[in-house]
Image: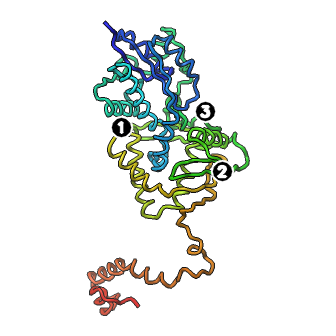
Amino acid sequence: MAKMKIVLAYSGGLDTSIILTWLKETYDCEVIAVCCNAGQKEDFDAIEQKAYHTGASKSYIVDIQKEFVEDYIWPVLKAGAIYENAYLLGTSMARPLMAKKLVEIAEAEGAFYICHGCTGKGNDQVRFETTIKALNPAIKIIAPWRMWDFHSREDLIEYAKSHNIPIAQSVEKIYSRDENIWHISHEGGNLENPWNEHKKDIHVLSHDIEDTPDYSEYIDIDFEQGIPVGLNGEKMDAVSLLNKLNELGSKHGIGTIDIIENRLVGMKSRGVYETPGGTILYNAHIALERLILDRDTMQYKNIVAQKFSQMIYDGLWFTPLRNAISAFVDSTQEQVTGTVKMRLYKGNAIPAASKSDYSLYNEEFATFSADEVYNQSDAEGFINLFSLPLKIRAIQKETLEGGSKYSDTLEKKVLKGLDFIQ
């Protein structure tokens, strides 16, 4: 009789290395390891071989970088979605795509079980499982952290030693990290005390501010319909462009944040996130929108972005509302085409200039010098009408309080809606 097949979301790190062995011991099953290359700096050949050496029957390495950037990162960038005004959603965006690949491989392999290494305290368990249920509700989910007797990563380290499983973590250096082409996150270790300043050696993608150049560097980023398409006048594919911006952002110490965030599962957590290229792109995209979008569209889009960011954080990518919001965002981006000049210096990505054929900025109207297109006396009537409700309220208040601050004639004219403004 054939053994049951379990598709395992595999990284070759501490948790999933232990899980692979634990699954075989617990279920006497066939484990199919799936590692998604989302742009993290890893030796994927070594990961594949490690999976086999640890007991996997098959080991998949799936390159998702292009799909990740074009179909997940760019839509979130266009939306301007930032969770709790700080987190650029690096891990949150990647999980739905990874879960989608797990489902595709499970279906191809005839497997009815998917296993992930997310803890019972984290957000990722929700992101993986909501996606799996949305794409194939027949697949059952195994979540070892909600089942086994281990209680900490220190316990896992001891298990790895007893089973001769090679791992990189130690009790002294025990950060939990997640990396992809967009960012890297750091959690755990000394970060669990919010009074501890994060250590300088935590940096992986970006330099510490003290180690950055003492000069500014200017770059031009080209956008077409809200999507970054070129750097310094050179057209580039999505992956190459983001990698180059990561390199530049890292050089100047851009995009490192240290935040306390509200997890979906109800607790607060602390994370250090490095998003060098992504921070440059967000700042550039916002600057271009300021040049092109009208006030009402910008303000409403900001409201939508808040909801969008929460949905992505909560793992609700494959939902009707997310699709509808993305459709709205795409309509706002039809004319967000142009170039933004960015100044990179000491952790800052500063929009220095912008231009677009669709710009709503008109120098002839905005100038403080003499012009022939704007009659400043027109502003008086506008202000009178704009402030009319305030004027009526003030008169009403005075009348109710029995005062005589305003003349009876003026009061009667205002309350009757007559043209009293001259």
- Label 1 environment density (alpha carbons within 10 Å; few <14, some 14–19, many ≥20): few
Residue at mark 1: 266
Residue 128 position in % (x across, y down)? 38, 31
Image quadrant where one finds the C terminus:
bottom left
Separation (CA) of disc 1 from disc 2:
46 Å
Q: Residue 315, labelled with which disc?
A: none
Q: Earlier in the sequence, mark 1 or mark 2?
A: 2
SS at mark 2 in the image: loop
Q: Earlier in the sequence, mark 3 or mark 2?
A: 3
Residue 259 position in % (x across, y down)? 50, 41
Dot in front, 3 or 1: 3
Separation (CA) of disc 3 from disc 1:
29 Å
Q: Earlier in the sequence, mark 3 or mark 1?
A: 3
At horizontal 31% and vertical 29% (from top left) the residue drawn is 136
SS at mark 3 in the image: loop
At horizontal 34% and vertical 77% (from top left) the residue drawn is 389
Give the left or right position of residue 343, taking residue 132 as reference. right
Q: Quadrant of residue 132?
A: top left
In front of the other: 22 or 151: 22
Residue at mark 2: 233
Q: Quadrant of residue 141?
A: top left
